[in-house]
Amino acid sequence: MIFRQLMDLQSSTYTYLLGDKHSRQAVLVDTVFEQAGRDAALLAELGLTLKYTVDTHVHADHVTGAWLHRARSGSQVVVAKASGASGADVYVQQGDMIAFGERHLSVRATPGHTNGCVTYVLDDQSRAFTGDALLIRGAGRTDFQEGDAATLYRSVHGQLFTLPDDCELYPAHDYRGLTVTSVAEEKRFNTRLGGELSESDFVGYMNNLNLPHPKQIDAAVPANLLCGEPANGEVPPDSPDWAPLRRTFAGIWEIDPRWLEEHLSEVQVLDVREPDEFHGPLGRIPGAKLIPLGKLPDETDNLSAERPIVTVCRAGGRSAQATVILDKAGFSRHANLPGGMLRWRALGLRTEAGEA
């Protein structure tokens, strides 16, 4: 199975990608609206087709990317039947299964943080995705969205602590950089739920946390009750509008070389090779401006903000780094030429100077 753990730094949210190697079908757990492009890029690079997005609960600290993924790729939206959310394709409850290729996730109802909290358990019980019901050495809050501490205690002990001790547990959030735990660890070391702590101990603990409400709750909850659909119902563009670009998982926008050749007059071509390469055998793209990568941070003033910038080098590595420098310098419209001059020449596109 293909497995990746991703993070949204703004909300400290983990998104999980699970893919079946044979069918290439995939599931995303707890997506984030602003990270839909990142997730789609990873799916494309791994050759996976997104079948489902599943949310462990109605989140209060970020907007889910479920609706956006469906709008862009045709994936199906999965939420708990008890969540109260509308607009999903599949509503699940205790004992249901979400299949992707030869693998599946089984559903365990784990209310307490919210009424609609569920945990998704991988078919071989090697991994479980607990949302906010059980965190690493902690537990989700129970002071809003119909939260109930006693219910959460029973959910964790009855549904999660009954999994095999070596089952890895992956939460929806962690604010300290912790990534994974296990049933055995949490049964022993969880300061709220583990060891000999009783239900009354847990309820007393949770009722005295006195935490402020999540900053995004007023916007996130209404949106998530619609599976992440924006108020205007419009799908935001999945790439900048000045050219047909592709976003890599590394976060770099890339441009098609054939499109670039046809639109050279509309962009600035920034060549970040060294002068001997610029004048060397590979040649250069017509009209390209030379600023070696090492000098670029100090020479961005020589570039115009009026036209988009396409960066190029020998093979595409240095020019990708150049887009990062341009970002820091305040340029928002730019893209890398993947494969650099090597690919440009291999495609037989127009070149100045150089040798065949």
Image (cartoon, grey):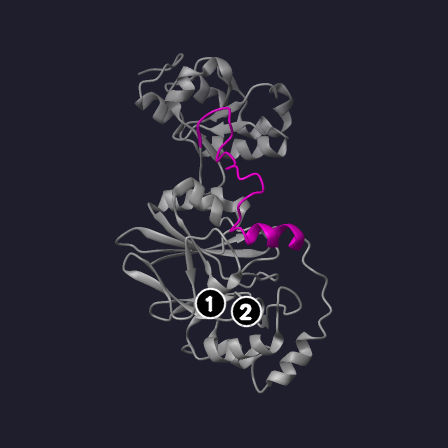
Q: Residues within 10 Å of mark 1 (few under 14, many from 20)?
A: many
Which type of secondary structure does the marked residue at label 2 adopt?
A: loop
Q: Residues within 10 Å of mark 2 (few under 14, many from 20)?
A: many
In the rendered image, which residue does mark 1 sit on? 119
The percent coordinates of residue 125 (x first, y second) are: 37, 71
- Determine the residue positioned at 63% across, 68% down: 141
Nearest to the observer: residue 50 or residue 217: 217
**Which quarter shows the C terminus?**
top left
Magenta region, mostly helix, strand or loop? loop
- The span from disc 1 to disc 2 (Cα, nearest Å) is 8 Å
In the rendered image, which residue does mark 2 sit on? 133
- Span highlighted in magenta in the image: 216-245
Q: Quadrant of residue 245?
A: top left
Counting residues from the start of the chain, the first of labels 1 and 2 encountered is: 1
Contact check, label 1 and label 2, Cβ < 8 Å:
yes
The percent coordinates of residue 297 (x first, y second) are: 61, 30
Is any part of residue 273 visible from this angle?
Answer: no
